[in-house]
Amino acid sequence: MKETVLRTSPIFPIIKQELIDYPTAGNISYLWGFGSLAGICLVIQLVTGIFLAMHYTPHIDLAFDSVEHIMRDVNYGWLLRYTHSNGASMFFIVVYIHIGRNIYYGSYLYPRRLLFASGIVIFLLMMGTGFIGYVLPWGQMSFWGATVITNLVTVVPFIGEDIVHWLWGGFSVDNATLNRFFSLHYLLPFIIVALVALHLILLHLDGSNNPLGFDHHFKVPFYPYLYHKDLFGFLLFVMFFSYFVFFIPNFLGHPDNYIKANPMVTPTHIVPEWYFLPFYAILRSIPNKLNGVIAMLGSILVLFVLFINPVYLKSSLFRARYKITFWSFVCNFLLLGWLGAQPVEYPYTELGYMCFHAHFLYFIVFIPYCNRWDSNFNFFWWPISLIKKVCVWIWKKRVFTGYSLFFFKLEKINTRHFPNFRRTRYFLSHILKVSNRLVWTPWKYTSAMYTVDKTKVW
């Protein structure tokens, strides 16, 4: 009876079509499970955050003590608090891997540009939510982190000071600031949920990418063929997450945040949470405040530059140079994170300045270079390309008569108008055939592995 009611429910066909029978590429790897893990992390953060808000007091005199009350007096309050605080770190770990997988396999290209753009918007909202959530415990790092980051708004010309005072609700970070941050921290996750729903709609409209980087007709239902990959990844994630919650719950936090906020005492080193450290390193690597803020925001918004770099070979499986540059970018990003936690002194600032340039060069120079190389194999064979253009121009000008010079394949030259051109004909034919092998043969083998529809690049 219950099964009949479930099958007749109007929502069951939607669940069956979009989840159980959802057509998925049969060759996807375990890396494709990080999208569903990100959704699970979002649900965990929502549930634990709602229960924590029942016992939290957004007041500068009571906020720190209310957190201690949750830890000591509320039943399983320690579990809620540690799950929520470590869950934010797990959320960012999953999202960073998810974004990296999309860049590695070219999922930002047509037809998934809007899908990737919506994911970057979700990431920006996550960063905002994570920052204002870090302020709520009202420890030393919470207070001074809020003071430093909100002061960055003063770089806005003419109205920067007014915006900062509006954010603070006064002339410094105070009780009004804490109340506003608490309200926003409660509101923004639901906006993220709405954007995640839009993200899923775009995903099901365009379909998932696959390791080969191109759409093919080898689709299988998600259940029962591929759900085990997500299930296996979920079990590993639960073990990893549980180890942090139950054994090292404070490993990813800062010890100064267990000291109540004191506006009269400045910490020796003000650092944000670890998932903001790469961008914080970029911010402080530039002495000029305005340029530092622009560089920090640009280091995130530069992800949108990926859309203007079309390429026929999307996946890194067929692109050795792109693969090398990608892993170099990952190492540089991790190095930026380490530098962000170091003191502002030599040589950390100089290294951060170098890594900051490498971060932008990857998106602005290296990716277009690799795309140009992979889309046009004779990028460095410009002398041979020049010879080809000259020969085609000569052919169009009717200097020679005969058959086509298509792709350097010289079939025949009619020497009726050139009686003494017989030997020159064979010499020129030999040169063109050799150049044809040098330029077009490697691309022929590459294109045999990957059939490209050039009309769908954009």
Image: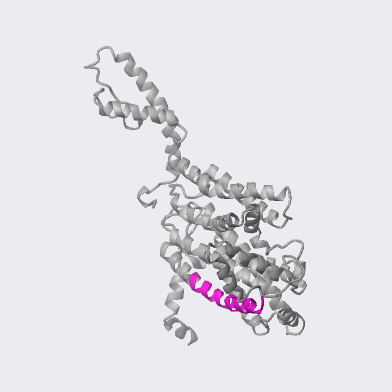
Residue 162 in picture, x, y percent from top left: 56, 70
Q: Compared to 135, does 4 lie above or below?
A: below
Q: Is residue 381 visible?
A: yes
Rendered view: 293 above or below 2: above
Residues 240 and 235: in front is 240
Q: Is residue 421 magenta?
A: no
- Which residue is outermost to the bottom? 1
Residue found at the far left of this picture: 416
Q: Main secondary structure of the magenta part?
A: helix
- Front residue of 227/452: it is 452
Location of residue 219 with respect to 247 vertically, above or below: above
- At horizontal 33% and vertical 16% (from top left) the residue drawn is 424
Q: Residue furthest top?
A: 420
Return the residue nearer the eye: 113 or 135.
Answer: 135
Give residue 268's position: percent from left, percent from top.
Answer: 77, 62
Residue drawn at (68%, 47%), measured in percent from left and top?
A: 350
The segment highlighted magenta reads 174-195
Residue in the picture at 44% in, 58% down: 113
